[in-house]
Every structure is written in structure tokens, then in C-alpha cells.
Amino acid sequence: MSPLLSNPHQDELLVEELLSTLTLEEKVALTAGKDFWHTTPLPSRGIPSIRLSDGPNGVRGTRFFDGVPSACLPCGTALGATFNPTLLTELGQLQGQEAKAKGAVVVLGPTLNIQRGPLGGRGFESFSEDPILSGILAGHYCRGVQRENIAATLKHFVCNDMEHERMGVNVMVTQRAMREIYLLPFMLAISIGDPRAVMTAYNKVNGTHVSESKELLQNVLRDEWKFDGLVMSDWFGTYSTTGSIQAGVDLEMPGPTRWRGQALSHAVKANKVTEPQLDDRVRNVLNLINYSAGSGVPENAPELHLNRTQDRQLLRRAAAESIVLLKNKDAVLPFSKSKRTAVIGPNAKTAVFCGGGSASLLPYYAVSPYEGIASQCEDTVFSQGATSHKMLPPLGNVMRTAEGHRGFTWRAYNEPPSEVDRKPIDERVLGESSIFFLDYENEALAPVWYCQAEGVFTPDESGLYDFGLGVEGTGMLYIDDVLVIDNAQHQKPGGVVWGSGTIEEIGSKELVAGQDYRVRLEWGCAKTSKLSPTGPVGGKHGGFKLGVCRRIHPDDAIAEAVEVAKNADQVVLVVGLNGEWETEGEDREMMDMGSQSNTLVSKVLAANPNTAVVVQSGTPVVMPWIDEAKAVCHAWYGGNETGNAIADVLFGNVNPAGKLPLTIPRRLQDNPTYFNFRSEAGRVLYGEDVYVGYRYYETIDAKPLFPFGHGLSYSTFDLSSLNVQTDDVVTRITLQLCNTSSRAGTEVIQVYVAPPTTPVKRPLKELKAFSKEFLQAGESKLVVVDLDTVFSTSYWDEGCEKWCSRAGEYKLLVGTSSAEIALEASFTVGRTNFWTGLTPQA
Ligand code: BGC
């Protein structure tokens, strides 16, 4: 059967007719989910349930337990670095097709929040610190998704820019920063991409939770911007019955409802909510069902794989386009494929392909940097050099079953292990080490149930191995029937299983290389736990997390790597963060990489200067060794094709063209949110106001480590002959761009506007447009960029509560990064213009 299922027979719902005939209870039922991923159906009225699925970098499907794998796109900041709207549309369309394969009609992405500072746990999910770059890319991504009649969802509207106390924090922000920085990406994305859904943020803005804010949902989103799609709450982000309905949240997610159902019927009967108000919410739900019927996805469709050749090619191209060449002294890169290459680092053999939380998914496959490099270069050697994990790396997929399959054998039981003749009620081969049974269903399951996970582990090297076991429930880990970890008797609350479980308990054992060890976990469900359930989804079934790592003294690991580096012609050193450091629900506490990574980099650089450092992280890290490094690439989290894309850039198959979508400061203390990042007694002050990212560093004349928009190429370019023609509507910029090298390459022309002195202080300059240009070796071409004159000169006037484009002379600054401005010109705005709406012309 084709994975792109079709259901041409679904009739369009007659929305107004239904609104006049549905009962109060039926209408109320439609305003909340049925379960975690579906809306509530009304079969007797012909209203189907539709499926929603995360998220920004892949369509995860509905199953937490034993889910179906998916295509994984590069993370948000990686996509931001492409500066390529056309590519975003192609990737969006792939998301639409992946959604169809997963039977979903609503994609819960893109994420459009702003990286105010380097520490945001979900910073990797959003595109950029710049609202215009974010909004343009998001709009084009939505266009792609919706080409398939799959609804895109802008999230999280608005100001969910950090994770600390995300449900309760009150974001205190000026109206001007709200408009110019935080709302602008949503406004642009709506005007470009017409997304069919918006998800509210968890937090409060200026005293009111967004899911109860009439100001944001009704006045701005619907009345001013004329958004006519569906507004849903973030998961467990509805906090009231009347307030959320009146503000405009159409759909409470997930289900079953906590705030609607009987409570909402009661509120309508008590005239707290009027029927017309309820009808407005239901109308949007029904309209979304009608819209998504065009996708042809049937109700409750099975979840399937796509994983097509053309998708892999697209993902490889996208990941390579996202890589930013930060530094390339003495043209160290590209490397030669025929030289002896050492591949070193904690992120080298592990495929670090995406961040953590709801953006993470089970990939069809993930290519590690080592695999990517080794597939193009025969003479490669590896040394890990340092670790970068918080909890021990996964054990599941490095085991094999008794039959030789990768993973372990998993069996569910209704009796505890002490029952000698117990019979399994389910048996599967699994590879995931972190298992959450939230949606596990089995009719035979007793209220208190157990499972066993059994596999063979054969270490590559002899030594002392640490094993890790965290549970929600209880767990005992045995190796060759000897108990190594008891996580049942004295349980300590910790972070595993969505924060509802214990800490990771560690047990150690001396192992011999090449010998088989039988690992067995005996687990009891959440009801056997000694701890009380916590978190919104705690207490149901539970789960476990298994890890393993050979214990090696950090100094020995570095010494070994240094030896390997010395004996190689060239070194690729892959360091950075991963989905444990950058994840939903938790901000980073520091800007540094894991414990020994910086020491490893310094020592390897000293041992072999012919080294390319590849940094993987979604948001900035400190690089204390930067002056010693000749070549540095920033490679983000690149999705399935991570390793191939890194190899393509390092060996020059792809000429790098990525540009930083966010500033990399030298130190955490330098960033504009240093005093105002965490929630302090329930509030966070956006004290940097509109001076976010480069707007801040430029205003205080501080040189960051790498500026916004920076990114090198193996080619060189020359910009000349800037010409500007302006009228009230369009400002047309033309310039000559020449590839002055002997290699075909791509450059991103960035157009910034600097305002005249106005009654309010403004950033020195702001990005208003960009254009990505490919040129053959030696080619010269005319680049044309059009700006909307009024839009590109406007700021938010708080007194008038309108955008204002003030008459005066503006500077146009054109360059290849925010700090490398090659050409300047000016243009004049003849008369002051005030406007509201989605665009000045709307
Ligand atoms: C996240 C959303 C996500 C939802 C469903 C929430 O915790 O904030 O971005 O779409 O979960 O997984």
C-alpha cells in the first residue's frame, strides 16, 4: 500500500449547519482533544477525529512506546543558517508528506521563539535571534507543509523564549519589544505562509497567561492580523475554562479535557461563556477538519515509513547548507580524501542529530560524523578523547538479542519475576534505551504489571564499565544474573521518564573485550514505585532508561587522542552539546561544553595544527581555544544526514555557505540577558528591550566572538556598484556580485537598514532582506533585492499603538555579515506613515 493514503470520499462538513444543530455537549466535546494526539470525533454527526503530530524538525507520529521512525530535518538554528527560503519550502513539503505517512494532518511546528540569550533549552528549535530572518523562513516552511494540505502550526505564541518555570513565569516586556522582536516573526510567517494553526505559549505575558490573553489572541492575532485558523493550547497549557474560551483558545490539548467537558457546559449554562463565543471556537475546529480533508489522510490512519532516496538527498543538501565555516586560516580546509585522517571527539562516533524534548524523534537512520568521513576517506582512525553525556550513553542499541538482532528482547508480564512460570503477554525486539510506556496499550495488561529487557552486550575494550538505570516504577539490573543495580528499595527522585522518575543509579562491572555478557532488566510499572507521581503525565505505566559507558580517566582519554592526532595528516575534532544539554523543560546553566571538551580541543590543536574543529550545538558555546584553531565549522544538529553533510563540507564536495543566524558571544557574561534570563520569583524582565542579539552588541560596540550573519566560503566574493531606487512602496537595491575565486560558490547578500535619529532610540541597524546567490567560478551577476519601503523603516510607536515609518534619510548597508558591510547608500522616506495590520498595505 502506498504510504500516502488517500480518502477522496470524506465529505466537507457544513460548518454553519452543524453549528445550528449540534447540542451543547457535542460542541463542548469538540473543543478539547480526545487523547494526546487526536481531536474528539462525533461519528453520529459525521465529524472525524484528526491527528496532530510534533514537530519542528520531523513528524514524530503518535507513539512514545515502540514508535515508527521518521525523517529528521536539521534543527531550527541549522535551518536559520541556510538563509534559504526556497529550501525551507522544500523541507516543509517533505514534512507535509511525512505527516501523511504518519496519518497526521496537523504538524506542530515551526517553532518561532527568539534566542534572547545562549542558554535557552529550546533555542535550537527556533530559527534565529532576528525576527525578520525567522519570520521569512517560517512563512516559507509553512507554504511547503501546506502544499500537501497539511496544516502548519506556529508555536509558541508568544515569548516562550526560555524553559525555566515555563508554565508560570510572567514575561515582563515592553510593547515595542513585543512588536518588533517577539510578535514580528509570527506576523511575517502568517503573511507569507498563511498557517492554519497557532499554538499558545505556556507563559504569562505582562501578567496574563497567553492562553487567557484576549489582547494577544483576539486583538492582535485575529482582529489586527485577520488570522482565521485554529488556536490550540500547548500541551497542558490551558489553565481555565471561561478565560481560555473567551480569549480564543479553540482547542485544549491534549485530551482528555481538564478544563472543558462538564465544566464548560456548566459555564455556558451559567452564562459565563455565551453560545456565540462557544460557536466561534467550534467553527475554527470544524474549519480545520475541512481544510485537512484536502490532504486525503483517512481517520485513524496507520503510521508508516517513507524514507525515500530523494528525501535523503534533500536532507543531506539541507544539512550541508546549514554548516557555517567560522574560520579557515591558511585555507586548511577543504581536507584531502586521500590523507590519513584522525576523527576525534565525543560527538564523532555518536550521531548527534537533534536536540531533546518534543522535537526529538526516532530517526529512520542517523549518520555519525565518523561514518560520514570514513565513507569518503579510506584511511581513518578514531579516538573519543572525552565524553559529553549527562547521563550514560544509550545501552539499548549496542546490545543484541539472543537471535542476533540489534537491540534487546522485551517481554511484558502480569506477574512479578518471583513467579517462576510466568508467561509473557507481549514480546518485542526494541532498540530504544529510554522507554516511556505512556501510550502502551494491551488489553491483557493487569493494573500492576512488569517487564523484562534482555540482551547481550559485547564490549570492544576491556575495562571497568558503568551501567545506568533510571526508572519510573522499580528496576533491578543484572549482568549474567548478578545484581548490578537496585533501583527499587531506596529510590531517589530525579529527571528520568519526563521528570516523573528517579535519578540514574549507577552500577559498575569489570568486563573483558570480546566476551558476551547477558544484561537483564527486571522492571515493575509506576504503581510499584516508592515515589509519588509527579509531572502532568506521571503515574501512568512509567518507564525506564538504560545506559552504559566504559570508565576511563579523563586525562588518559585525552592522552590517547593526542597520540592519534599526532600520527595523522589531518584531524577532524567533533565536539559540542547534544539533546541532553539542549532540551525542552530545562535551560542550560552555562555556555561551556561538557567537562573535558575544551581541554581536549586545546591539546589536540597543539598536537596537530592541521585540525578542523567541528562544533555541534543548537545555540552558542564558549570557544576558549579559538585563537589556536585554524579551521572551525559550526554544524548544529543536522538530522538524519548529519555525518554525511559534515564530511561533504570538510572534503569540499559542498562549498560552505551557512551564515550564523545568531551571535556567538565570547563569554556568557557578555550576552544581553545576563541579568535577566531565569524566572526570578515568577517573573522575567526582558530588560534588553529591542536590543536582542546583534542589535545589542552593536549598540554597546562590543565585538562578539562571531557576529550575526557571519560565515565563510571556500570561494571569495566581491560586491560593487550599489544602486538604490525608492518610492513610497518599494525600495529597489541592485548591486554587482562577483565570484573572484576558481571554485563555484554561494554567498548571502544581507541588506540592513540604519534609521535616522527618531524620537525613540533605535538599534544601529537591522536586517531587512537577504538574497542567497550561487555563482560559478569567476562569474559576475546583478543582484536585485526589493524592500517594502514602509515596512523596512518602521518601528512600533507605543504612544500611538501603531507602526511608524518616519520621514527622513535612511542608510542602506549591504554586506556578507552584520560586521562585514561592503557597500553603503541612502534613501529617503518622504512622509511619515502610521499603520497597523499584517502589512502596511493590508
Ligand atoms: C511542547 C510543544 C509540543 C507539545 C506536544 C509541549 O510540551 O511545548 O512544542 O508540540 O508538547 O508534544
Image (cartoon, grey):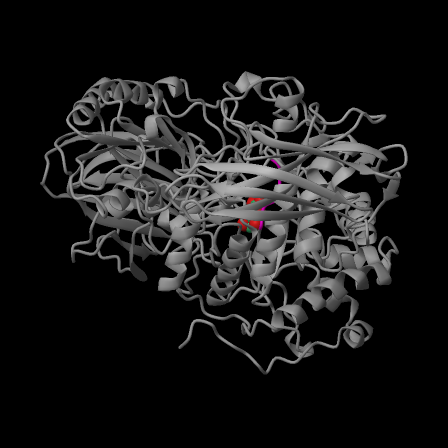
- Is 209 placed left or right of 629 in the picture? right
Q: Nearer the viewer, residue 835 or 532?
A: 835
Secondary structure mainly formed by the magenta segment: loop
Query: Can the viewer see residue 490 in this picture?
Result: no
Q: Nearer the viewer, residue 255 or 812?
A: 812
Q: Is residue 7 above or below residue 364?
A: below
Residue 232, position as x, y percentages in the image: 67, 53
The part of the image, by quadrant, that contains residue 67 is bottom left
Which image quarter is the N terminus in? bottom left
The part of the image, by quadrant, that contains residue 734 is top right
Instruction: Examine the structure image and report whether residue 8 is included in the region drawn in magenta.
Output: no
Query: Can the viewer see residue 544 in this picture?
Result: yes
- Is 250 placed left or right of 807 in the picture? left
Q: Residue at x 58, y 37 (%)?
A: 720
Q: Nearer the viewer, residue 711 or 382?
A: 711
Q: Is residue 273 above or below residue 588?
A: below
In the image, which residues are magenta?
Answer: 110-114
Residue 765, position as x, y percentages in the image: 68, 30
Q: Residue at x 43, y 57 (%)?
A: 440
**Residue farthest along the bottom direction in this orientation:** 9
- Is 309 placed left or right of 349 in the picture? right
Residue 393, position as x, y percentages in the image: 31, 37
- Is 124 placed left or right of 756 in the picture? left
Residue 186, position as x, y percentages in the image: 69, 47
